[in-house]
Image (spheres, rainbow, N blue to C red):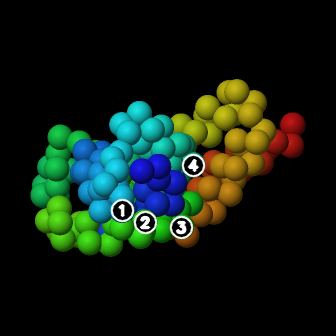
Amino acid sequence: MDATADELAGVVDLFGGLTRTELERALAEAAYRADGGSVEAAALETAVEDALESFALVRYEPDADEGLPDDEALLVAGPTAFPTVPEDAEDVPHILEIDRRRLDREALGEAASERLHAAVDSAVAADDTDRMRTLIDVTYDLEAWAPIDCTDERRRLEERLEE
């Protein structure tokens, strides 16, 4: 099963968030239900990294007191995603018996903001104008998605593009 960024976001959104291991199990179950297929680990890793890069997924490190898996970060549907549940994945939450996770939007916003800041630093250092333009759009999506302000990052990108 080859999943798009929006399909990955759709699967994690069914649960509120999944660890990388849980996501692989969920996709394997969906692939098996679809056609008896499986998930190729390398392709999934590439798809997850691409989804993180595009902010379709956000990596979130839960606090120990949140009662969530503390040995692995959670992957959460991000601000640029249009979560789409693959046809054969609707029943996966019942099969995996993972309760829906309710995550703190503010903490998610902070995690995404840190990732945005690093992406801005990288794009500016590389003088990657296409990436800088994309990140300007991400700042607006991120502000609509979580209670954070991305004005400084947006201004930095706009100023750099004007140079």
* Mark seen at residue 128: none
Q: Are marks 2 and 3 in contact (CB under 8 Å)?
A: no
Q: Are marks 4 and 2 in contact (CB under 8 Å)?
A: no
Quick one: SS at disc 3?
A: loop
Relative to residue 68, is residue 52 depicted above or below?
above
**Amino acid type shown at disc 4:** Ser
**Amino acid type shown at disc 1:** Ala
Relative to residue 83, is residue 63 depicted above or below?
above
Residue positioned 62% across, 56% down in the render: 138
From the viewer's side, name the closer residue of 52 and 137. Answer: 52
* N-terminal label among 1 and 3: 1
Q: Which residue is mark 1?
A: 34
From the viewer's side, name the closer residue of 143 and 88. Answer: 88
Residue 152 pos. (x, y %): 63, 50
* C-alpha span from label 1 to label 3: 22 Å
Q: Are marks 1 and 2 in contact (CB under 8 Å)?
A: yes
* C-alpha span from label 2 to label 3: 12 Å
Q: Which residue is mark 2?
A: 86
* Mark seen at residue 82: 3
* C-alpha span from label 4 to label 2: 20 Å
Residue positioned 75% across, 30% down in the render: 127
**Is residue 16 something one can see in this rendering?**
no
Seen from this angle, which residue lies furthest front? 35
